[in-house]
Image (tube, helix red, strand yellow):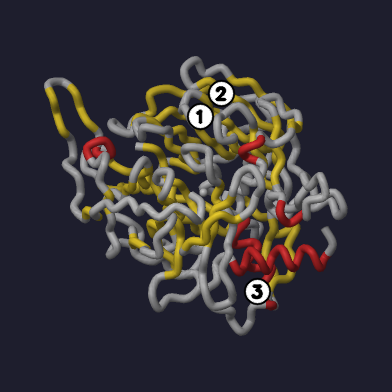
Amino acid sequence: MNVEELVRATLREQAADTESAPADLAGRVLTARRRRRARHLAGAAVTTVLVVAAAVAVPAALDRDGDTVRLASEVSRGRTLTHVDQSPPRDLIAVGEQALAAYSTTRKVEQPNRDEIATRTYSVLDQKTGRYEVDARWAYLTVAPGMRTAAVLERQLPATRIGILDLLTKKVTRWIPMEGLGGGVGALEFSPDGKKLIATTYDKNPDRTFWSKKVPVNNTEEPQPVSSRTGFAIVDVGSGAADWHELPAFKEPEYGMTFGSGQKLLFNDDGTLVYEAVNVAVNASDGEPADKVPARIYRDLRGKEVPAPPKEKYVDRMMAPAGLSPNGELVAGPFAGGLRTTATQVLDPRTGDRVAKLKGQELLVWADDERLIAWDIAAGGNEFENRLVLITIGSDKVVSLSGARTPKDYSPGRWEPIFAKR
């Protein structure tokens, strides 16, 4: 990737969050790229629109049938819950198979040596009340399918143990030791079936930026991260057994740089492989243009690079986190708008060709096979004042799910959603 290609790629990332081009776009290119760094599909012939009435009331807290306790996320099943007046959300948001299980806000905490630590605070769905409550104990939190269990890391990263958190009692039921495995854990994700965790390990806090590595940004200087990934462990949630494998951070081959990605590792669509988002297309083949092949690497569960599964060849979880549709027939595509309009797209997983153009800025998660939850600009807002919306393939209708986020980074009104199957 040469400098010109890097700038073009960064401009594409900026466009993915932009409804109209700001006057100082060029001067904000590298800043926009850093903003995206932290974050750690329905053909055109489809015409049927699935209509679900949006419910604005909070579901019943608990529904008891004898000794059976139904979670708030279960009581709301089959209902679309929206709260367009709330940002950050206070009450449960849910559509189709997906619910907003939690969200995080981030602030920068300056250290005595001028390093900075990006510190997350999580608000987690209380399954008794259907409301989000702050749980400030954790540096990292991820939620399992079913929204009954979360995996957590304590405040000092990298962590030497993983907590299994009961989301009904809010208590850690057990700790899985990780001491001695690649330094410690800095990021987690459940497998699609919730039976395994992938724990990315580091020798330094991955949320820390270092003043010793400062660079000039917009007439000032800012500390920068360093590549500190050591590998990953596949953890069996039931037994606690952890299988660790060494895997340093991916480096762009020409310049040896990571640009902040190539760090956190994820499971692929069925949990049989490891997915790594990187910053340069390394998988173009058979004469395909490099910009058509997503910037990612697939590996087996021991870290060996393998070809992308046929249906996941065009999955790009950096630009379109929704990935493959539940039925495997479509892939969420990247931003497809222009300088003054927002749009997204869904692709044919076999060819990577567009099969439908949709509303929205960024496709976050599939609610079902025809509907997606996305970010989009709020009416009258600027490029970063976006809210959660529901978009349907084959329809121009957009249903707002939340209020708009504030555009200011590292502020309480700038929140990142965590979705889980309910």
Q: Residue lying furthest left in this view? A: 66
Whether tag 1 and tag 3 are in contact, CB under 8 A, the answer is no
Whether tag 1 and tag 2 are in contact, CB under 8 A, the answer is yes
Secondary-structure class at tag 2: strand
Residue 28: image tag = 3
Mark 3: amino acid: Arg
Marks 1/2: CA–CA distance: 10 Å
Which residue is pictured at 69% across the width and 49% down the height? Answer: 294
Mark 2: amino acid: Val
Mark 1: amino acid: Ile
Label 1: how many residues lie within 10 Å, few (<14), some (14-19) or many (20+)? many
Q: Which residue is mark 1?
A: 162
Disc 1 vs disc 2: which is toward the camera?
2
Regarding residue 201, the answer to whether it shows in the image is: no
The image position of residue 264, as x and y in percent, is 63, 42
The image position of residue 392, as x and y in percent, is 40, 55
Q: Is 277 drawn above or below residue 2 in the view shown?
A: above
Regarding residue 137, the answer to whether it shows in the image is: yes
The image position of residue 4, as x and y in percent, is 81, 68
Q: Residue lying furthest bottom in this view? A: 23
Which residue is pictured at 26% across the width and 39% down the height? Answer: 77
Whether tag 2 and tag 3 are in contact, CB under 8 A, the answer is no
**In terms of sequence position, does the residue under pointer 1 or pointer 3 come before the other?**
3
Q: Is 393 drawn above or below residue 148 in the view shown?
A: below
